[in-house]
Image (cartoon, rainbow, N blue to C red):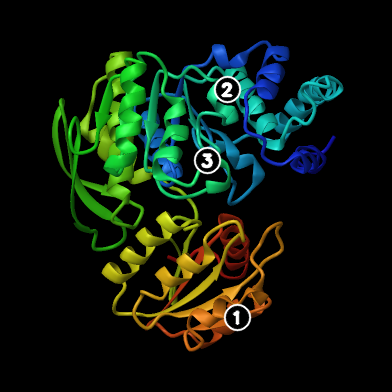
C-alpha cells in the first residue's frame, strides 16, 4: 500500500459523515488494546483558538524537554500533519502501517449491525492514540474535532482539560444558544481533573463552571486564577503581553502570531503548562516560556505569506473568528488598501461574515467558491449586501492572479474564510512565490 492509497482509504470513510457518539470509536479502540488508557493526555476544546493553544503548549512542553504528541484538525499543509510528535508529521511509512493494522478491525465493525459506519474522524482519532502509545510520548495534546461531549476524542482520560472560547458555530449539531454550545464543550470536563478556561462570556462560563463543580474539577479562569495583560503589537510581527498566576508575573512575553486574541490563547497554554509542571514536578521557568512561545507556529492563522506585496492568510471560518480578524485588520493595518479573497462553507453564516468584512474601512471583497462539498454558491445573492464593494469571482485562481498583478506595497491581500479554502490558496501561493516574509 502507498501513502496515497492509505489516505484515500481514510477519506473514503467521509461518506459516513459526522456522527456524534462514542460507541464506534470505543469499539475500534477496544480491538486495538485500548491505547488511550496508556498515554498521558491534555484535552483542548473551544469554538476558536484550539489550534493556536495546542501550538503554544506543544512548544512550551518541548522546551521543557518533553516528547509531545499532537492531534489536530483539519490539516493545512498535508494530511500527515494531523498527527505529529515534536512538530514532525507522522511518516508515510507509519501512516501506511497504521492503516494496514486498522483496516481489518474496521471491516469487523462494519459487519456489526449496531456499529456500522465508523467515520473518517473516528478512524484518525484511534490511529493517533495508537501511534502515540507506540512511540511512548511523554504527553499528547488532543484537540477536539467538534463540540466535546460526543466528539470521538472524548474517549480519553486526560490529566488536564481546557476550553478556549465559546461562540456560535456548528449550531446544526451543538444547538442554537451559547449555553447549549457551552454544555457540549463542557462535556470534556472529567472528575477531579483541572480545567483551564479562556476568554469566555459569562452565560457560557456559568454552564462550564456548573459542570466543573459537579465533577469536582478545579477550574482556572482567565482574569481570576491567572491573568493576561495585553500590551501592544510587536514592532515586527506578533503581540506583547504579561502573564501572571500563582507562580508570579512574567513581563514582556511575545507571541509570534498576530491578533489581539493570541495572548489569550497563549495564556491558556501557559496556565496548562504551569499545571503540568506542578503535576510532573518540573520547574516553571520564565526563560523556557519565552523561548517556547517564540518557536510556536500555526499555519493559516494570521500567517504572512509575502511581505512585498503583503499577503496574509487567516482561516477565520466562523462568525466568532471573523469578528476577531476584523478587529485585528482595523487596529493593525489601517494604512493599507485592503483586498479580501473570501470563501466559506454554506453551513456557516456567510451573510454575517461578509457584514463583518464590510466593517473594514474601504476593503474590497472578492467573493469566490472552491471545489469542496458544501462550498458556498455564488448564485445565492451574497453580492447584494454591497454591490460596490463585493465582487464575485467564479474561479479563485484567476481572481488571485489578477489581484497579485495589480498590487503595490500600499496594498494588502487577506485570504480568509474556510480552512479548506485558505489551505488551497496557501498551497498555490507558496508554490509560485515561496515564503518571503
Q: Is residue 321 above or below residue 252?
A: below
Q: Nearer the viewer, mark 3 or mark 2?
A: 3
- The residue tagged with tag 2: helix, strand or loop? helix
Q: Residue 162: horizontal and vertical position, in percent?
A: 38, 31
Q: Dot 3, crowdedness within 10 Å: few (<14), some or many (≥20)?
A: many
Q: Residue 158: horizontal and vertical position, in percent?
A: 45, 19
Residue 272, visible in the rendered structure: no
Measured Cα–Cα span from mark 3 to mark 2: 29 Å
Q: Quadrant of the N terminus?
A: top right
Instruction: Point out which mark residue 383 bears.
Output: none
Left or right side of 103 for 252 = left
Q: Earlier in the sequence, mark 3 or mark 1?
A: 3
Q: Nearer the viewer, mark 1 or mark 2?
A: 1
Residue 113, visible in the rendered structure: yes
- Between residues 287 and 228, which one lies in front from this camera angle? 228
Q: Earlier in the sequence, mark 1 or mark 2?
A: 2
Q: Is residue 353 above or below residue 158?
A: below
Q: Residue 343: horizontal and vertical position, in percent?
A: 57, 67
Measured Cα–Cα span from mark 1 to mark 2: 45 Å
Instruction: Point out which mark residue 392 bears.
Output: 1
Q: Which residue is mark 3?
A: 174
Q: Are marks 1 and 2 in contact (CB under 8 Å)?
A: no
Q: Are marks 3 and 2 in contact (CB under 8 Å)?
A: no
Name the residue at 48% across, 83% down: 386
Q: Which residue is mark 2?
A: 132
Name the residue at 35% across, 13% down: 192
Which image quadrant for residue 348?
bottom right
- The residue tagged with tag 3: helix, strand or loop? helix
Amino acid at each position: 500500500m502507498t501513502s496515497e492509497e492509505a489516505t484515500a482509504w481514510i477519506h473514503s470513510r467521509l461518506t459516513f459523515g459526522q456522527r456524534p457518539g462514542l460507541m464506534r470509536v470505543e469499539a475500534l479502540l477496544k480491538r486495538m488494546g485500548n491505547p488511550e488508557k496508556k498515554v498521558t493526555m491534555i484535552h483542548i476544546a473551544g469554538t476558536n483558538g484550539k489550534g493556536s493553544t495546542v501550538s503554544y503548549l506543544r512548544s512550551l512542553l518541548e522546551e521543557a524537554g518533553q516528547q509531545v504528541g499532537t492531534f489536530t484538525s483539519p490539516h493545512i499543509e498535508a494530511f500527515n500533519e494531523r498527527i505529529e510528535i515534536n512538530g514532525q508529521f507522522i511518516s508515510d511509512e507509519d501512516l501506511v502501517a497504521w492503516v494496514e493494522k486498522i483496516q481489518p478491525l474496521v471491516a469487523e465493525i462494519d459487519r456489526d449491525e449496531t456499529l456500522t459506519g465508523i467515520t473518517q474522524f473516528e478512524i484518525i482519532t484511534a490511529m493517533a492514540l495508537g501511534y502515540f502509545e507506540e512511540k511512548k510520548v511523554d504527553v499528547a495534546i488532543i484537540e477536539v474535532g467538534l463540540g466535546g461531549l460526543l466528539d470521538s476524542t472524548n474517549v480519553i482520560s486526560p490529566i488536564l482539560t481546557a476550553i478556549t472560547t465559546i461562540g456560535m458555530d456548528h449550531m446544526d449539531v451543538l444547538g442554537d444558544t451559547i449555553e447549549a454550545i457551552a454544555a457540549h464543550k463542557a462535556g470534556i470536563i472529567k472528575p477531579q481533573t483541572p480545567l483551564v478556561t479562556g476568554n469566555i462570556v459569562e452565560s457560557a462560563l456559568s454552564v462550564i463552571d456548573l459542570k466543573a463543580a459537579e465533577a469536582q474539577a478545579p477550574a482556572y479562569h482567565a482574569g481570576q486564577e491567572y491573568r493576561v495583560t495585553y500590551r501592544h503589537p510587536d514592532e515586527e510581527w506578533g503581540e506583547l503581553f504579561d502573564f501572571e498566576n500563582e507562580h508570579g508575573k512574567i513581563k514582556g512575553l511575545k507571541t509570534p502570531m498576530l491578533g489581539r486574541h493570541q495572548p489569550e490563547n497563549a495564556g491558556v497554554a501557559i496556565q496548562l503548562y504551569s499545571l503540568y509542571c506542578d503535576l510532573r514536578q518540573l520547574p516553571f521557568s520564565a526563560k523556557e516560556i519565552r523561548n517556547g512561545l517564540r518557536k510556536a507556529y500555526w499555519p493559516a492563522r494570521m500567517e504572512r505569506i509575502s511581505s512585498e506585496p503583503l499577503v496574509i492568510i487567516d482561516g477565520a471560518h466562523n462568525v466568532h473568528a471573523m469578528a476577531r480578524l476584523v478587529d485585528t485588520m482595523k487596529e493593525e493595518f489601517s494604512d493599507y488598501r485592503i483586498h479580501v479573497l473570501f470563501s466559506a462553507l454554506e453551513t456557516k453564516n456567510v451573510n454575517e461574515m461578509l457584514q463583518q468584512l464590510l466593517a473594514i474601512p474601504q476593503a474590497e471583497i472578492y467573493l469566490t467558491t472552491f471545489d469542496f462539498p458544501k462550498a458556498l454558491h455564488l448564485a445565492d445573492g451574497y453580492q447584494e449586501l454591497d454591490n460596490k464593494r463585493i465582487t464575485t469571482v467564479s474561479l479563485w485562481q484567476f481572481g488571485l492572479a489578477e489581484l497579485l498583478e495589480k498590487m503595490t506595497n500600499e496594498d494588502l491581500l487577506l485570504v480568509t474564510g474556510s480552512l479548506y479554502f485558505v489551505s488551497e490558496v496557501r498551497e498555490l501561493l507558496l508554490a509560485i512565490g515561496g515564503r518571503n516574509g
